Amino acid sequence: LTGDGFIKLERDIPARMRFSSWREEVREIRDPVTKQIKQGKVLILQATELDGQPVDLPYSTVSIKHQAALRDLIRTGAAFSRLIEIIYHPRGFATEYEIRVL
């Protein structure tokens, strides 16, 4: 689940994380389908726990829908006070992220 200094979700496998802070960045990202490079907003949350183990790693997403769901958890404070389970279901443009607050 970790690689290159960040958290990478595995297909259809739950990852339970606890976060301490968040930030946004604008980055050049490669579209996974068209392979073209474009500017995109990235939401980054700093994880302090991953699957019951202490970590100090960023979890980031470029998915607008996933960012919206995570921003709701940031706004309510749940992202920082509760354990968050995320399951990645890749399906091209229809990729889904299942989020549960534990």
Image (cartoon, helix red, strand yellow):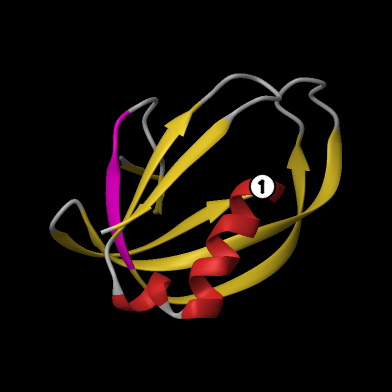
Q: Position of residue 29 (x, y in %)?
A: 74, 43
Identified at 85% across, 29% down, the residue is 36
Q: Residue 28 colored magenta?
A: no
Identified at 29% across, 70% down, the residue is 82
Q: How many marks?
A: 1
Q: Quadrant of residue 95?
A: top right
- Seen in the image, is 8 located left or right of residue 49? right
Q: Position of residue 21 (x, y in %)?
A: 45, 78
The residue stretch that appears in magenta: 13-18
Q: Does residue 44 lie above or below 21 as drawn?
A: above
Q: Does residue 82 lie above or below 26 as drawn?
A: below
Q: Residue type at mark 1?
A: Lys
The furthest residue to the left: 52
Identified at 75% across, 20% down, the residue is 33
- Seen in the image, is 99 located left or right of residue 37? left
Q: Quadrant of residue 91?
A: top right
Predominant secondary structure, magenta span? strand
Identified at 41% across, 70% down, the residue is 79
In the foreground, 50 or 95: 95
Q: Residues within 10 Å of mark 1 (few under 14, many from 20)?
A: few
